[in-house]
Image (cartoon, rainbow, N blue to C red):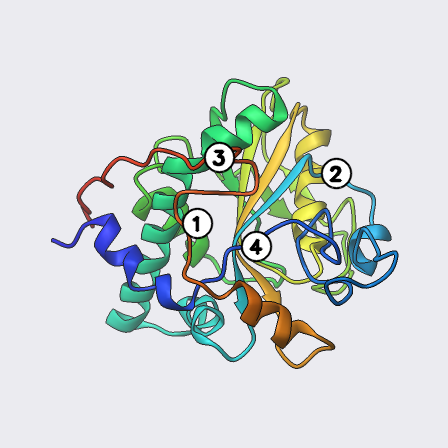
């Protein structure tokens, strides 16, 4: 069976590590202005106009519209059969490898010991009964999270906002979370509305801290200077550093994949 390292290595050539800096949103890491612009905006418009329920936002990679990571993040939900299972396995390996190295960095940044509970952002659409593919990735395929995963949220029947609109009551908690931190997982961050709405529900249930890890921060290459900014960063994905690493993390060999 292939290892987590081998499966995640397939994505290295088209993943791009987000980095903080001038002209980068301090919340979601999208580009706000060209590098070197005078008095760049500290946040993008969606982040600046939404109440910040999340305590930390950590995108693993930029997901560029029309490119390979974006294709995988769309296809794993839309396709069926062995192709969909393969993509889900690969994305689970990416999540596994990243969290194994950097979940402690996120916890340290928030001043906590760790995340005893893990959940996912529910679908923004009303889905038929069944396990959502993201829940399958986090709760079954990713060995780093599956023993802590719990489906803590469900879509509220009272919410009627659009898929990309924030609503503090879009989701309802399914259980109490007595002053515990929660690690929230999502596949893609576009406006952040779904993740912030999920965090609001978790905080209502009692969560003390909520950090979200998203596999891809969605970008369009042809918007303003995004293409140039991305090209400046495209020097190979770095598994050993994250947004919160002061020094490169020491990453042990990822454990062998056990797909059940």
- Judging by the rendered image, the residue that carries numbered circle 2 is 53
Kindly state the secondary structure of the residue where label 2 is placed. Answer: loop
Measured in 3D between alpha carbons, the distance from the residue under mark 2 to the one under mark 3, in whole angstroms, is 17 Å
Task: Confirm whether residue 145 shows in the render.
Answer: no
Between label 1 and label 4, give the one nearer the viewer. Answer: 4
Q: Can you tell which mark lies on residue 42?
A: none
Kindly state the secondary structure of the residue where label 1 is placed. Answer: helix
Q: Is residue 212 above or below residue 130?
A: above
Q: Position of residue 31 (x, y in %)?
A: 70, 62
Image-based side of 214 in relation to 248, left or right:
right
Q: Position of residue 152 (x, y in %)?
A: 55, 37
- Judging by the rendered image, the residue that carries numbered circle 4 is 18
Residue at the image point whose x is 49% and y is 61% from the top: 16
Q: Can you tell which mark lies on residue 135?
A: 1
The quadrant holding residue 107 is: top right
Taking depth in this image into account, of 64 and 238 the one nearest to the observer is 238
Residues packed near mark 1 inside 10 Å, few (<14), some (14 to 19) or many (20 plus)? many
Residues packed near mark 2 inside 10 Å, few (<14), some (14 to 19) or many (20 plus)? some
Between label 3 and label 1, give the one nearer the viewer. Answer: 3
Q: Position of residue 101 (x, y in %)?
A: 39, 37
Q: Earlier in the sequence, mark 4 or mark 2?
A: 4
Taking depth in this image into account, of 46 and 78 the one nearest to the observer is 46
Measured in 3D between alpha carbons, the distance from the residue under mark 2 to the one under mark 1, in whole angstroms, is 22 Å
- Judging by the rendered image, the residue that carries numbered circle 3 is 118
């Amino acid at each position: 069976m292939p290892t987590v390292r081998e499966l995640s290595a397939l994505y290295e050539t088209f993943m791009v590590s987000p980095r903080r800096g001038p002209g980068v949103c301090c919340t979601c890491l999208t580009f706000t202005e060209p590098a070197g612009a005078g008095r760049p905006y500290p946040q993008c418009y969606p982040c600046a106009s939404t109440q910040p329920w999340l305590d930390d936002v950590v995108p693993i990679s930029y997901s560029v519209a029309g490119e390979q990571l974006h294709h995988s993040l769309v296809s794993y939900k839309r396709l069926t059969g062995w192709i969909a299972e393969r993509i889900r396995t690969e994305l689970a390996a990416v999540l596994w490898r990243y969290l194994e190295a950097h979940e402690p960095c996120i916890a340290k940044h928030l001043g906590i010991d760790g995340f005893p509970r893990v959940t996912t952002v529910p679908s923004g659409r009303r889905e038929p009964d069944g396990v959502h593919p993201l829940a399958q990735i986090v709760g079954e395929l990713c060995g780093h999270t599956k023993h802590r995963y719990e489906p803590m949220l469900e879509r509220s029947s009272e919410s009627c906002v659009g898929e990309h609109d924030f609503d503090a009551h879009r989701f309802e908690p399914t259980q109490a979370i007595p002053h515990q931190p929660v690690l929230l997982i999502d596949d893609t961050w576009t406006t952040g509305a779904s993740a912030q709405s999920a965090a609001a529900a978790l905080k209502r249930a009692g969560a003390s801290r909520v950090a979200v890890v998203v596999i891809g921060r969605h970008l369009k290459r042809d918007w303003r200077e995004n293409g140039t900014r991305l090209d400046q960063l495209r020097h190979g994905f770095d598994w050993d550093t994250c947004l919160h690493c002061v020094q490169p993390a020491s990453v042990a060999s990822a454990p062998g994949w056990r797909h059940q």
